[in-house]
Image (cartoon, rainbow, N blue to C red):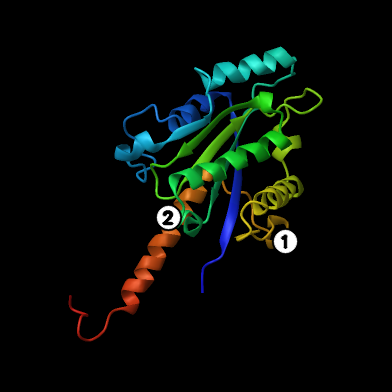
Amino acid sequence: MEKAQFAILRFAKYKGPTISRIEAHNERTKEFYASNPDIDPARKHLNYNLLTPPPKYRAEVERQIKEVGCRTRKDSVRLVEAMVTASPEFFQRKSPKEIRAYFERAVGFMKSHQSPDTLISAVVHMDEETPHMHLSFVPITEDGRLCAKDIVGNKKRLTQWQDDFWSYMVKFYPDLERGESASLTGRTHIPPRIFKQATKMHRLEQKLRELLSSINPMNAKR
């Protein structure tokens, strides 16, 4: 029986001081990433941008805020990042072209739910175990306010995002399933970095279980 394959969308919110760090990670501007050993530098050339990034994320964020005339506080969330991926099994039999098409459609979904003018970067990472995309945008509302809370700020809103994302993607990929709603399970939002670490630990657990199940009196010592 094949494993269920899920469309995955996760959000994280960032204030001014952390935006440069997010840019460095997304655009792979460093040679080594101690916080993420899953990155394979030899595969860095396989990464690509689906939106041309600005020279500096933070400068573009501040430009947009100033242009719209948003009121801000020192602790205002200035950047929201959507991490888009799917179950690892979903990508296993897909070509690079098919994988790219998945993320291009995800960008199309984001453009239909958030003003395209506020999107500043969409980077696909192929240098880690599971392909995924980091799409960053300035959380400016339709009425010109800087308000991440109105866009992705509560369980009800996040559940709606998940429902809409699955409904959009399943039209192109009918095998994808909708994960359980956080409003039903009671689970809280997991930041993309922690989500990726948890996924890795889950795979290691599965490998360990397989190894333990193969032990018998004949090979136990080995």
Task: Tell me which residue sits at (75%, 45%) in the image.
Answer: 157
Q: Earlier in the sequence, mark 2 or mark 1?
A: 1
Q: Is 142 rendered above or below residue 161?
A: above
Q: Which of 135 and 191 lies nearest the eye of the viewer?
A: 135
Task: Tell me which residue sits at (52%, 28%) in the image.
Answer: 18
Q: Is 116 rendered above or below residue 167?
A: above
Task: Tell me which residue sits at (67%, 23%) in the image.
Answer: 117
Kind of element beneath mark 1: helix
Kind of element beneath mark 2: helix
Within 10 Å of disc 1 (Cα), the crowding (few <14, some 14-19, many 20+) is few
Q: Position of residue 15 (x, y in %)?
A: 59, 28
Q: Residue furthest right?
A: 143
Task: Tell me which residue sits at (69%, 21%) in the image.
Answer: 73
Q: Which of 130 and 109 lies nearest the eye of the viewer?
A: 109
Identify the residue under disc 2. Answer: 200
Labels in figure, total: 2
Q: Position of residue 77 (x, y in %)?
A: 65, 29
Q: Residue furthest bottom?
A: 217
Identify the residue under disc 1. Answer: 184
Q: Position of residue 138 (x, y in %)?
A: 65, 27
Relative horizontal placement of residue 222, taking residue 18 as reference (left or right): left
Q: Is 172 rendered above or below residue 2?
A: above
Q: Locate residue 40: give its quadrant.
A: top left
Q: Which of 60 and 36 lies nearest the eye of the viewer?
A: 60
Within 10 Å of disc 2 (Cα), the crowding (few <14, some 14-19, many 20+) is some
